[in-house]
Amino acid sequence: MPQNQLEPEFATAFTQWQTRPTQATRSQLLRQLNPVIDQAITSYGAGSQGSSTLRSHARLMALNALRTYDATKGTLRTHLLSQLRGLQRIGARQQQVISVPERVALDRQRLTTAETELRDRFGRDPSDAEIADYTGLSLKRLAHVRQGRPPVAQGTITDSGNPDAFTPASRIPGQDPGYAAWIEFVYGDLDPINQAIMDYALGLHGTPRIPATEIARRLGLTAGAVSQRAAKIQAMLDERQTLRLL
């Protein structure tokens, strides 16, 4: 029988999170794993140990790594440190920009064609994730092709005073890359319909922001259904504060 190699100091928090993955259990597990995250930042940070953005990325990567951990194949510390090697590439990826006009024009044509074909296939507007899968373009590339700016606003998705509107961004784009990473983390866990709601509500990946009633029309939903989904998405976005992903 394979031996359980999960370290005793992490066992309780990991088991509680695995059994009941809530905000509270995730926060507790991340607190227990702080020494491992600190070690990864020191080892792979290349002089950026004090960067809050790097720490935010490290915590997000740790959350992702927990999903693939198998206690019969090694310790949790070893697994996390292996997965967190990606911190070495974070800075380089953030600086990567493709600015060849001809390539942008070609990709914009691919984007337009994909949107039309997927809309005909689904009977609704596709999410950006579906467009990315269909075209092979990354979400960052979609934003670049659309000449839009990625949102980093930490406001609310919906305006409680006007259910037909979405609250404008409360932060200036470009000022909080850590929150932008959290938005993409949440986005990756959603189904295509909820991804499309995020695209339109927050203006993700260069997508124009539109009112809730227009989102409902484009996705074939009622306005109430869009509001309910938006509220659940907002709750997921709010977990950032609980998990201290600042």
Image: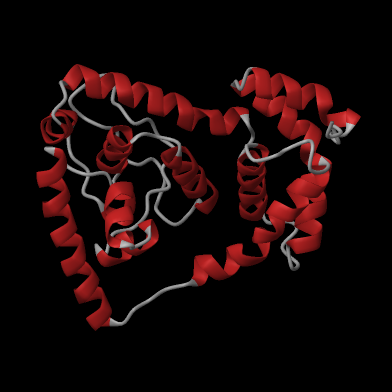
Quadrant of the drawing holding the N terminus:
top right
x, y percentage for residue 16? 72, 19
- Indicate left or right for 207 with 139 as reference: left
Q: Please, which residue is most extreme toward the front here?
A: 1
x, y percentage for residue 151? 37, 49
| Residue shown at 30% from the left, 60% from the top | 142
Task: Quadrant for residue 112, please give it.
Answer: bottom left
- Indicate left or right for 223 with 21 as reference: left
x, y percentage for residue 69? 70, 39
Q: Above or below — where is 58 with respect to 163?
A: below
Please count the marks in the image. Answer: 0
Quadrant of the drawing holding the C terminus:
top right
| Residue shown at 65% from the left, 55% from the top | 54
From the viewer's side, name the closer residue of 10 and 216.
Answer: 10
From the viewer's side, name the closer residue of 26 and 153.
Answer: 26
Q: Above or below — where is 201 with respect to 104?
A: above
- Indicate left or right for 99 with 123 as reference: right
| Residue shown at 28% from the left, 46% from the top | 203
Task: Quadrant for residue 5, please give it.
Answer: top right
Q: Above or below — where is 171 with respect to 12?
A: below
x, y percentage for residue 202? 31, 41
